[in-house]
Amino acid sequence: MNSSILVGILTGTSAVIGWFAGRKKYKAEVDKDISETKKNEEDIREARITQLSTSIDIYEKVFKELKEQMTVLTKKCSELTTKCIDLSTEISELRTENKDLKKQIHELNSRLQNKKK
């Protein structure tokens, strides 16, 4: 019976030692996995920051180009508006002149008709 108790004690002791050793190994693996996961998350964050930085650079470049184009187009629009106003004024003057010339032609035609009589 002594040997049965001794075998039982040794088996129990071995099981406890094995459990502690296994637990220690498992905890080390979990810690390693957590560490790798944190590193991967940091790498992902860095990649996202780099992508955002690149996106911002592209956005700023496009914004600058669009602003320059808008400045050029605004200047051209202003020039064309001025030209349109000038042409409208000229058309008004030409209409007035045309009206006066029509009136003169009508008067001259009337005189000519009176002279023929």
Image (cartoon, grey):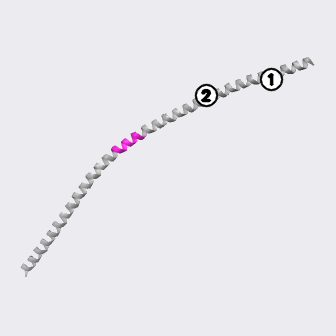
Snapshot quadrant of residue 68 = top left
**Mark 2 highlights which residue?**
35
Q: For mark 2, give the secondary structure.
A: helix
> Is residue 60 within the magenta segment?
yes
Return the x and y of residue 84 as percentages of the image width and height: 25, 57
Return the x and y of residue 58 as percentages of the image width and height: 43, 39
* Magenta-drawn stretch, dominant element (helix, strand or loop): helix
Residue extending farthest to the left is 115
Look at label 1 and name its amino acid: Ala
Residue 82 as seen in the image, left or right of residue 9 = left
First in sequence: mark 2 or mark 1?
1
Residue for point 86% across, 21% down = 8
Residue extending farthest to the bottom is 117
50 relative to 67, above or below? above
Residue for point 51% across, 32% down = 46
**Marks 2/1: CA distance?**
30 Å
104 relative to 83, above or below? below
Residue for point 78% across, 23% down = 16
97 relative to 67, above or below? below
- For the magenta stretch, what is the residue range? 59-68
Q: For mark 1, give the secondary structure.
A: helix
Snapshot quadrant of residue 83 = bottom left
Return the x and y of residue 79 as percentages of the image width and height: 25, 51
> Is residue 73 within the magenta segment?
no
Return the x and y of residue 57 as percentages of the image width and height: 42, 37
Q: Label for residue 15?
A: 1
